[in-house]
Structure formats: structure tokens, C-alpha cells
Image (cartoon, grey):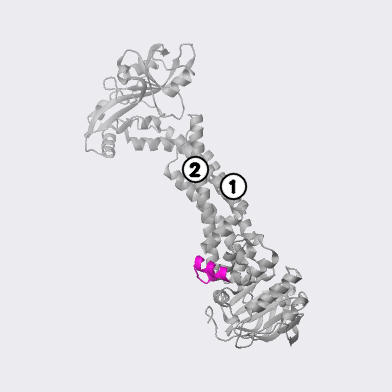
Amino acid sequence: MYWIAWKMLTGDRSKYWAIIFGITFACVLIAEQAAIFCGIMLRTTSQIRDIHDADIWVMNANLRYIDDLKPIADTAFLRVRGVKGVAWAVNFYKGAAQAQLENGNYQSVILLGVDDATLVGAPQTLILGRVGDLQFPDAVLVDEAGYRYMWPGEPFRLGRTIEMNDHRAVIVGIFKASYTFSTQPIFYTRFCRATLFVPATRRSLSFVLAKCSPGESPDVVAQRIHEQTRLQALTRNQFSWLTMSYYLERTGIPVNFGSTVLLGFIVGTAIAGQTFYLFTVENLRQFGALKAMGMSDHRIVRMVFVQAAVVGSVGYCLGVGLATALGIFLQHLRPLMSFFLPWQVLALTGAGVLLIVLLSSLLSIRRLLVLEPGMVFQ
Amino acid sequence: MTGCTATYAGIHCREVTKDYGKGESRVRALRGVTVDIEPGELTLLVGPSGCGKTTLISILAGTLDVTAGDVEVLGVALNELSKEAKTAFRAANVGFVFQQFNLLPALTAAENVAVPLVIRGASRSSAVAQAKRLLEAVGLGERVDTRPGELSGGQQQRVAIARALVHKPRLLVCDEPTSAVDAKTGHRVMELIRELALSPDRVAVVVTHDARVFSFADRIITLEDGRVANDERVHPDVTPVDKEGRS
């Protein structure tokens, strides 16, 4: 029976592809926009994810996301070290600085300061230079994208000198970093230098990075740190979600992307639903003949669902494939483009397609169920 | 009683009335039609447009409910059947030849003919094999894999006849089988219906207003304004099939 449904569907090539086009279109829009949204959300946490050494981030109790800088007491790392289950704890500075380039131009940069002695938190993947070179006086590391942004078209060169807060800084390494939300250049230096590269404040410590002792659960240790220091202590995952939650709740990003996803769904449903319904209406005599010849409503409904499943599956595969190819292509063309396609996006798109084909087929089924087999004699 | 093959062969209509619409817009298509149609002969339902031919054949085929009266087809009281039971009854007992053929354009000739068998649960391969044999019998052995759009009107009607007979129904209903083809082809179509469809245990009813095919009938029932105006047995040019199946 299903082969009849399949042949009826594919027999009218133009309608068949029109239905698939509608679903594919919706699929591309939903998957593409959702993937870009996920990519942007991921970028808000890139600096958290790029620091692999630490299990726990300790910060001001009122901090809402990673760029919401609220310094804590400079001695906080000592208090964290005293908590049971903490293997080590180090200073970590994060701030915004103004870098004056060789040509006199100013550039806002993200300044990160790692522990002077251990360099914990420093980037792991260097394109040029060594992490250990941060121990040199005035040494800074700059991220690849930031370097290209500040000196476009120029080859990588170590030893470049810039000024921050009237202090000399020498680039001793170039590293790979995940793209950030703000896309500003990222500079790494030692904590003591970082506090010189920005105007002095009463408190300068942004975060304490802590590592759990072997066998200790980061969740438990983070809770313990909070209880003993009254500071906010979060695992990497918790801190990532705190940051993303801020952007989800306090910015228009979800609404903007959500509206595009909704638009894709509506347009896809309209195109696919209308074409599928038209396909059914144009085949009413055939369906009527089948009913007259003794095909039950139950089997007719199954035929329509098979047809819907076929166009849904083909449209979904084409749509997700196109969205992926488009995302990869655009990212290649423009690395700043954020595109992250986790399985959740695929599932969301699949659910959207399922809903589209269900709505489309229900319209058709309703028409077929009220169809009198006697109409074939008229 | 419903889906299975009934034992009693024949059609009995008693005071059948059929109304379309309600209230002031009601139209009475049949006004107390009483007829008995026996198997083994070709019965034509004739009359002017709007006289109720199509309504009557739809009722006999179980695709339309009566407003009043009794209809017994092959020993089954159709009035008493549920919608599902009527569907099963049609699948098991009724073969259709439609005016516009109503072949599925995406299927080949053989696949079209196989549809009634598939509806009854046969596998695709066995149904198509059986369909091909029947298509050879109607002279379309070379066109089994051709789609309806590539066949002439006469060939399409032959495919439709094969489709109507492939599951060996005990009631064959044909709605204007010659109206969409030329006179010569129409003649051939009626010959085919007589050759293949007539058997001692099969009831064959043909709706037509094509006077050129009257000569094929064993009996002609004339309807006028929803009533039986005339019912006469005739002597067809072709020898009718007797109760033992001899012609």
C-alpha cells in the first residue's frame, strides 16, 4: 500500500519538489538561525572555556556574567586556599584597557592577568612564541584575531611594542583563542603587569581560579568555598550558564533570533502545507476512486502520513545539510561568523519539521475523510 | 456478512428514495425505485441527464446511502451496514469502471490494475503479476509498464475494465464507459465488458446514455425523473451467457 502512496507523491514532480522546498526552506532558516544563536551564546563564555586548568571560579557575590567586573579583595585567593578540598588557588585579573599602537591609534582590548608565578590560566595553543616568555619584563601575549585586527595584512611578528596606561608592553607570543562576544583583541600578561596596564583602583582582583584536590567534587568544593568566604564560587559549567543566562534574559538576542526561527516555521508551514493540500485536492478523484474500490479511511490516512513522512524526511535532510554547508561556508568566508550546531538544534529543527508535516497532513486528511467515494461517479 | 462474499446473487431495490440537500434546497433524485437485477446478464441503466442513473448506480455500488427504501445487493442489506462494513463490502464484491477512467497517473497500467488486489491485502508482486495476465487478456500485454498518460482513451478504458475485474467481483458497475472514447472504441469496450464481465454469478450494471451500445444489453431499464419509466428485456446482438456459463 505504501508504494502507491510513494508513487502518487513522486508522480507529480513539481508538487513533490515544491513541498520539499517549503520544508527545506523552513529547515534552513530554523537550523541556521538556531545555530548562529548557539554560536553567539557560546562566545559569551569563550574566556571561561579557554581556561582549562581551573575547576572553580571564585568571584564577587553580585557578579552576573563574566564581563560584569566587580573586583574582590586582593587577599581573597588566600582565603580560598584555606578551604578544604582546594588543591591550589591563584589570582586572575580581567579588565578592559586602552592600547596605544605604534601609529598612535588607540584600541580597546580585553586584558587578562594570570598568576605571576605559575602562569595558571594562560593560553595553551600558541602560534608564535612560548607561554614561559610571559616572565620577561613587559611581556604580553595577543590573540591571533586581535593581531590581525590591529595590524591587518601584516605578517605575525614578535617584539612589537604598544603602550597601555603609559606602560610599555612587548608582544612575545601570539595564541589561538575562541572568538569572544565583543571581538576585541585579547591580551594576556602576568597579574602584576596587568594592574599596571590599567588605572589603579582600590581593589584589583577580578577572580580567583581554584583547582580541586584529587577525588573532590567541584560542585561540593565550590559550595564549601561559598560558605566559608561568602564569595560566589562556581564550576566552569555553572559560570558558563550564569553568563549565558544573563545574555538570554537581559538582551534582545533570543527574541530576535526566535522571531526569525518562528518566521521560518510559519513560511515553511505555509508553503509546505499549501502545496501538500493542493496536491491532495488535485488527487481527490484518485483518492475517491481508491475509497470507492474499498480502501478504508484508516489506510488513506496512513498513505497521507507516509507521504508527509517522505517529504518531511527529505526536506529535513536537505535543510540541515544546506544549513550546515552554509554555516561552514560563511564561517570560512568570515571567521567572525558564529555557527554552532549541537544535536539540540538538530532536534529542535526536527521537531519543527515534524510539526509542519503534521499540520500539512492534517489539513489533507480532514479533506479526505469527508470525501464521499460516490464523488467519482459525478 | 459484510466484507465476505455474500451467497445470494442479485440486486433487489424496494421503493428506493434519495434526497440531496435539506429543507428548501432539497432535491429528490430517486422517487421510489423498485428493480430486481439478476446475475448473468448485462443491464443498462439509461435515461436523460438528471434522471437519477448515477445516483442509483452509486447506491447499488454501496458508495451512497439511500434516504428511504431497501437495497439488497448480493444478499446483503446495504442499509444496515456501517461505513466501514460497506467499504469492506465494496473491496470484496464490487468492480468499478468510471466514466473518466480514474486511473492513478503515477502508476503503470499493471500497477493500476493491481490496486484492487492490493486493497484486499495482496502483495505488490503477486498483484502486479496477476494484473499483467489480465492486461494480456484485454490486449494490452505490450503496454503493462506504460503510464495512463501515454495510453489512448480506449486503452485506458481497457485498463479500467481489467482493474474492475482483477479481483473477480460479483458486481460490476460501469458509469458511462463509452462516453470518453470514440464510437469504434466504445463498441470494443462494450464487447470487452460482455466477453470478460458476464458470468452466471456476476451482476453487471452499466449506466449509459449512448444509444449505440444498447445493442449489447440483455435488459434496459429507463429512468425518468427519478422513477423507472421502462424496463424491458432485449435480445442482444451478442449471445448472452447462460446459467452454466455457455454462450
Say which residue appears at 48% left-offset and 11% top-offset. A104
Q: Nearer the viewer, residue A204 or B37?
A: B37
In the rendered image, residue A142, in percent from the top left (x then y), is placed at 40, 20
| Dot 2 or dot 1, earlier in sequence | 1
Chain letter of mark 2 equals A
- Disc 1: CA contacts within 10 A as few (<14), some (14-19) or many (>=20): some
Q: CA distance from mark 2 to mark 1?
A: 19 Å
Q: Is residue A231 visible?
A: no
Give left or right: position of B236 versus A370: right
In the rendered image, residue A116, in percent from the top left (x then y), is placed at 29, 19
Q: Which range is magenta?
A: B117-133
Q: Which residue is mark 1?
A: A267
Chain letter of mark 1 equals A
Give left or right: position of A346 versus A286: left
Say which residue appears at 69% left-offset and 84% top-offset. B239
Amino acid bearing label 1? Val
In the rendered image, residue A118, in percent from the top left (x then y), is placed at 26, 22
Q: Is residue A140 above or below residue A258?
A: above
- Disc 2: CA contacts within 10 A as few (<14), some (14-19) or many (>=20): some
Secondary structure mostly seen in the magenta stretch: helix
Q: Nearer the viewer, residue A4 or A155?
A: A4
Q: Which residue is mark 2?
A: A321
Q: Is residue A156 above or below residue A176?
A: above
For the residues beneath circles 2 and 1, the answer to whether they share a chain is yes
Give left or right: position of A340 versus B69: left
Disc on res. A186: none
